[in-house]
C-alpha cells in the first residue's frame, strides 16, 4: 500500500501489514523535529508531485519485495503544513521472520528520501528554507 | 511545451509552470536545462536539478515532445 495523505494513519498502516503468515511487523514513523541547524523549527510544509511520487513509492515497494521475502509493505507520506511532534511519513514491512521486515523497513525510508519527489520547507521563527536545495 | 515546477524551482521562477513556445521547444532534456538556466540563474545554484518525463526520471539525452508531461525535480527532501 502506498499513499499520499493529509494525515498519517498508523492504525491503517498497521492493519494493512497484518497477515497470518507474518511473524514480525516493523513500522517506522518519521516526525517533525523542533530544531534544525541550531534553530527552532516551528513547522514543516510538505509538497509532492503526486502522480510521480506515487509511482516512485510503488517502485521502491516492489524493489523491497524482490529483495526480501515480505508479506506486506506500506509507505504513507503527508503533504501540507505539520507542527513539531506530528507524524509525516510511515514505512512498514511484515515478514515470516523479523530480519527481513527490519531490513526492508529501513530500506523503504532510505530510498524514499533519495528519490521520491516530495519537498519540505522548514519554517523557523524568523524565516523559512527549502531543505537540501542548496549545496 | 509546459514544464511543471515544484519546491524551490517554483519560488525561483515565480510560477508553478513555464510555457515554452513551440518554435523554441527544446529537443532533449539537456537542451531544456540549458534553456532554463539561461533564463533563470537561480536554477544553476541548486545542489542538483533533475527532469522528469511522464512521471519518471529522464536522462540528459531523453528526447522531448510537446505531448509529454515534463517537470523539474529539485533536490528531494521527503521523509
Image (cartoon, coloured by chain):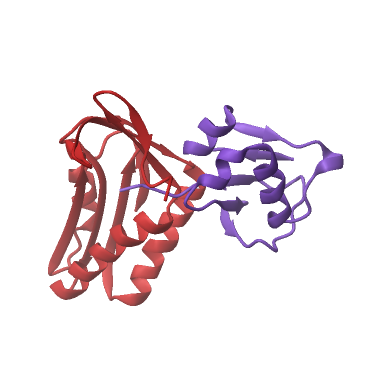
Chain colours: A red, B purple
Relative to A98, residue A118 above or below: above
Q: Position of residue A116 (x, y in %)?
A: 42, 52
Residue at coordinates 65% horizontally, 44% vertically from top-left? B37
User: Position of A60 compared to A24: left or right?
Assistant: right
Which part of the image, by quadrant, shows the N terminus of chain B? top right
Q: Which x, y percent locates residue A134? A: 43, 46
Would you say residue A97 is visible in this rendering? no
In the image, taking residue B28 as reference, residue A45 lies left or right, namely: left
Q: Nearer the viewer, residue B19 or A11?
A: B19
Q: Nearer the viewer, residue A96 or B17?
A: B17
Left or right: A78, with B32 as reference point: left
Residue A88, image quadrant: top left
* Front-most of residues A40 and A20: A40
Quarter where residue A85 is shown: top left
Please tell me which residue is depicted at 60% across the width and 45% down the height of the picture. B71
Q: Is residue A70 visible?
A: yes
Q: Which residue is depicted at the point 34% across and 30% down?
A: A128
Amino acid at each position: 500500500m502506498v499513499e499520499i495523505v493529509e494525515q498519517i494513519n498508523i492504525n491503517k498502516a498497521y492493519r494493512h501489514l497484518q497477515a497470518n503468515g507474518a511473524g514480525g511487523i516493523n513500522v517506522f514513523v518519521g516526525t517533525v523535529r523542533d530544531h534544525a541547524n541550531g534553530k527552532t523549527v516551528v513547522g514543516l510544509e510538505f509538497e509532492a508531485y503526486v502522480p510521480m511520487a506515487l509511482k516512485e513509492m510503488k517502485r521502491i515497494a516492489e524493489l523491497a519485495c524482490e529483495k526480501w521475502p515480505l508479506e506486506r509493505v506500506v509507505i504513507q507520506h503527508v503533504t501540507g503544513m505539520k507542527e513539531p511532534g506530528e507524524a509525516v511519513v510511515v514505512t512498514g514491512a511484515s515478514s515470516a521472520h523479523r530480519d527481513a521486515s527490519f531490513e526492508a523497513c529501513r530500506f523503504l525510508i532510505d530510498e524514499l528520501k533519495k528519490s521520491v519527489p516530495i519537498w519540505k520547507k522548514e519554517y523557523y521563527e524568523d524565516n523559512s528554507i527549502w531543505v537540501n536545495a542548496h549545496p | 511545451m509546459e514544464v511543471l515546477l515544484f519546491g524551490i524551482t517554483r519560488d525561483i521562477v515565480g510560477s508553478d509552470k513555464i510555457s515554452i513556445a513551440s518554435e523554441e521547444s527544446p529537443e532533449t532534456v539537456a537542451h531544456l536545462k540549458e534553456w532554463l538556466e539561461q533564463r533563470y540563474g537561480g536554477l544553476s545554484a541548486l545542489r542538483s536539478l533533475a527532469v522528469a518525463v511522464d512521471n519518471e526520471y529522464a536522462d540528459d539525452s531523453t528526447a522531448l515532445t510537446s505531448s509529454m508531461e515534463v517537470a523539474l525535480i529539485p533536490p528531494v527532501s521527503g521523509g
